[in-house]
């Protein structure tokens, strides 16, 4: 019944002692798909938004690889659990009704009954929407009373600040008045015409929607890109409880506003017009899951729409948890941050996630202090606002997600103190570089993110200059491009997104009407004194302390992305420059992505075989090992 298999083991091309060796494999050990047993209700029928399951038993089938796929009207996440007895439990949750095909293979062969046809019944994702006509707002004039309405639950007016910056750069405090039902009115009397910036903060952090744009005098060009939407109801919600957010349409002018909520259950949506260019929205859903909240103005999505909102079932256990030792500000980059979570007798699993200001998911450690208390630790790598989700048995605990500021709150990474100007924010011609300046002089250090959405991808470049950054982009297809500028976290600066109208002829064929190009930069502190010296002193940089690692430094393959990392965290201040020189054609594409704390990831794409030279410089100096020689087979 056993089969002899000859196994050769070689080192440097020569057999090692006793090689080749004979291994006897019994017939029962060879993978045989016909002996796999599959059972469970999830192979025959299912219901939308309910978990279906089945079990795969390979105990009698020998050794082999198991593969699984589910295709149907909705994308499904497949979860597998090893039951540690030679069987495997599979669960999946469809979100649309219809027929699904489940394919199960063992040792590259279908198991008995595969592919299975499963009929899923029930309601699909349900969508509810409301619309409202927005009138053009009354024009604000010099000397008139200007009001901005906000609704913010569970805060104290004593911890709120509001400031207005005029077009000439003068800043003064605005009046904050408390109304009924968690509403607040920000009031100021302008002395200048033009675009004003209104910064509203709670405990030194911008409230949702802030910094706001407020135009005194005739409004500029309106449209969906001038609408702001923000509030807890766009971040999280609980079943059966109202989720609330605000929409500010004043700067967008007249038009039609529509709000839609789509998800596992039908939403009840309520709308409140505050008559001052803002409105409140409240919605209630009955089933947990991910909901998509779309906010459109004249049929175009407003910035950051659609919003994906996780909805959980209120958990009495999660509500018992309390947080201690949480510092919401005063933390420094590269210094560990931690806080404690007390379970107060609740039994279950605690989970934490940390989102950096530039949107990356940071490493986070949850450790048990004792059976009723846990510590959550992470090391911030950027200045700005971090968002920390803490969940217990899948439900947010009170106060989650927590917002934690890294850097001095008085000046670090404040989007309300950043401005942008230049012809490239308004117009441009295809094939020609368009440019604009992002002025971060007064804003303190923080992460800068620039995204350009339009009919074509754009080649983007960013260079430090006296005022902050000079951004250059080259559009290839005419049309409207939206330029989003965020600073110190997920906050748009005032005026963002900007709308640039590009003219000229179409220089590339584009398969899509909507292409996105993005760039991140970690800002260093700038002060007025630095305006006199735009060039960085060379003494602040040391290329010998740069460390590069990765397969892409020595070996590359045609037609696939080759990569390596460069750690410049100990090398001072400078620019990372990467170039690849080839035998015939230049390198097809090089992407240098900053991951935070001067750690870079570099990917490049080559079209031809041959010998290449890879150059990596920190400023004007080669890093250790550069230039590298690459052999491309």
Image (tube, rainbow, N blue to C red):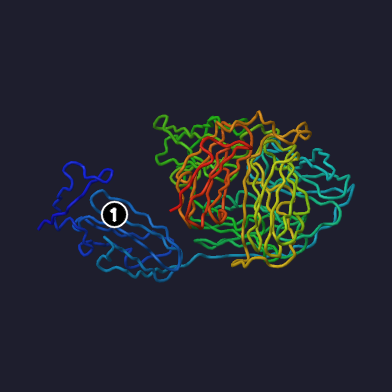
Query: x, y (%) of residue 250?
Result: 76, 56
Instruction: State the residue in front, 439 or 358.
Output: 439
On screen, residue 143 versus residue 68, left or right, reads: right
Residue drawn at x 29%, y 68% is 114
Query: x, y (%) of residue 611?
Result: 49, 50
Task: Place residue 425 in its image quadrant.
Answer: bottom right
> Looking at the image, how many numbered discs can be counted on the residues?
1
Element type at mark 1 = strand
Which residue lies under the disc numbered 1?
88
Taking 91 as reference, is 146 above or below it? above
> Is residue 203 visible in this depiction of the protein?
no
On screen, residue 303 versus residue 140, left or right, reads: left
Residue drawn at x 26%, y 62% is 38
On screen, residue 519 versus residue 81, left or right, reads: right
Taking 269 as reference, is 366 above or below it? above
Query: x, y (%) of residue 99?
Result: 39, 71
Taking 298 as reference, is 472 above or below it? above
Task: Place residue 459 in its image quadrant.
Answer: bottom right
Task: Place residue 357 in its image quadrant.
Answer: top right
Residue lying at the far left of the rendered structure: 1
Instruction: State the residue in front, 512 or 224.
Output: 512
On screen, residue 122 versus residue 547, left or right, reads: left
């Amino acid at each position: 019944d056993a089969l002899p298999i000859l196994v050769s083991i070689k080192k440097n091309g020569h057999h090692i002692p006793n090689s080749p060796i004979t291994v006897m494999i019994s017939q029962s050990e060879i993978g045989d798909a016909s002996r796999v047993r599959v059972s469970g209700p999830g192979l025959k029928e299912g219901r939308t938004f309910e978990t279906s399951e089945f079990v795969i038993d390979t105990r009698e089938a020998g050794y082999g690889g198991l593969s699984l796929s589910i295709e149907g009207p909705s994308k499904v996440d497949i979860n597998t659990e090893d039951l540690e007895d030679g069987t495997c439990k599979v669960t999946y949750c469809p979100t649309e009704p219809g027929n699904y095909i489940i394919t199960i293979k063992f040792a590259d062969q279908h198991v008995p009954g595969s592919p299975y046809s499963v009929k899923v019944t029930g309601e699909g994702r349900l969508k509810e929407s409301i619309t409202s006509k927005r009138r053009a707002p009354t024009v604000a004039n010099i000397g008139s009373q200007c009001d901005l309405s906000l609704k913010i639950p569970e805060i104290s007016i004593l911890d709120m600040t509001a400031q207005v910056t005029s077009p000439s750069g003068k800043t003064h405090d605005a009046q904050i008045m408390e109304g009924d039902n968690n509403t607040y009115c920000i009031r100021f009397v302008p002395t200048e015409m033009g675009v004003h910036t209104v910064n509203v903060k709670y405990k030194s952090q911008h409230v949702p929607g802030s910094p706001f744009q407020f135009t005194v005098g005739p409004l500029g060009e309106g449209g969906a890109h001038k609408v702001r939407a923000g509030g807890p109801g766009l971040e999280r919600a609980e079943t059966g409880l109202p989720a609330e957010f605000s929409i500010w349409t004043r700067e967008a002018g007249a038009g039609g506003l529509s709000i839609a909520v789509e998800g596992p259950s039908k939403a009840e949506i309520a709308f409140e017009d505050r008559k001052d260019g803002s409105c409140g929205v409240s919605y209630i859903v009955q089933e947990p899951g991910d909901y998509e909240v779309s906010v459109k103005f004249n049929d175009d999505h407003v910035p950051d729409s659609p919003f994906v909102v996780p909805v959980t079932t209120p958990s009495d256990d999660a509500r018992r948890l309390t947080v201690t030792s949480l510092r919401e500000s005063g933390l420094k980059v590269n210094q560990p941050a931690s806080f404690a979570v007390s379970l107060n007798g609740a039994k279950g699993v605690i989970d934490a996630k940390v989102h950096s200001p530039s949107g990356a998911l940071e490493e986070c450690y949850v450790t048990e202090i004792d059976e009723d208390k846990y510590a959550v630790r992470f090391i911030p790598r950027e200045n700005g606002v971090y968002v920390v989700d803490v969940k217990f048995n899948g439900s947010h605990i009170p106060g989650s997600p927590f917002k934690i500021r890294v850097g001095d709150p008085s000046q670090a990474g404040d989007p309300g103190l950043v401005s942008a100007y230049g012809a490239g924010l308004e117009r441009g011609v295809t094939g020609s570089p368009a440019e604009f300046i992002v002025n971060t002089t007064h804003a303190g250090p923080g992460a800068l993110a620039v995204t350009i959405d339009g009919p074509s991808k754009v080649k983007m470049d960013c260079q430090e200059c006296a005022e902050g950054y000079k951004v250059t982009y080259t559009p290839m297809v005419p049309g409207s491009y939206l330029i989003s500028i965020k600073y110190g976290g997920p906050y748009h600066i005032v005026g963002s997104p900007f709308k640039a109208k590009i003219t000229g002829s179409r220089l590339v064929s584009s398969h899509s009407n909507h292409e996105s190009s993005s760039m991140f930069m970690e800002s260093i502190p700038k002060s007025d004194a630095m305006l006199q010296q735009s060039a960085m002193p060379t003494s602040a940089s040391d290329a010998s302390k740069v460390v590069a690692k990765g397969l892409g430094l020595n070996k590359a393959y045609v037609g696939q992305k080759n990569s390596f990392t460069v750690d410049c965290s100990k090398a001072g201040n400078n620019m990372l420059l990467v170039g690849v020189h080839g035998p015939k054609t230049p390198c097809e594409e090089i992407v240098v992505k900053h991951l935070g704390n001067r750690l870079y990831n570099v990917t490049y794409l080559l079209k031809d075989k041959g010998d290449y030279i890879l150059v990596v410089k920190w400023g004007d100096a080669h890093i250790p090992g550069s230039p590298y020689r690459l052999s491309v087979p």
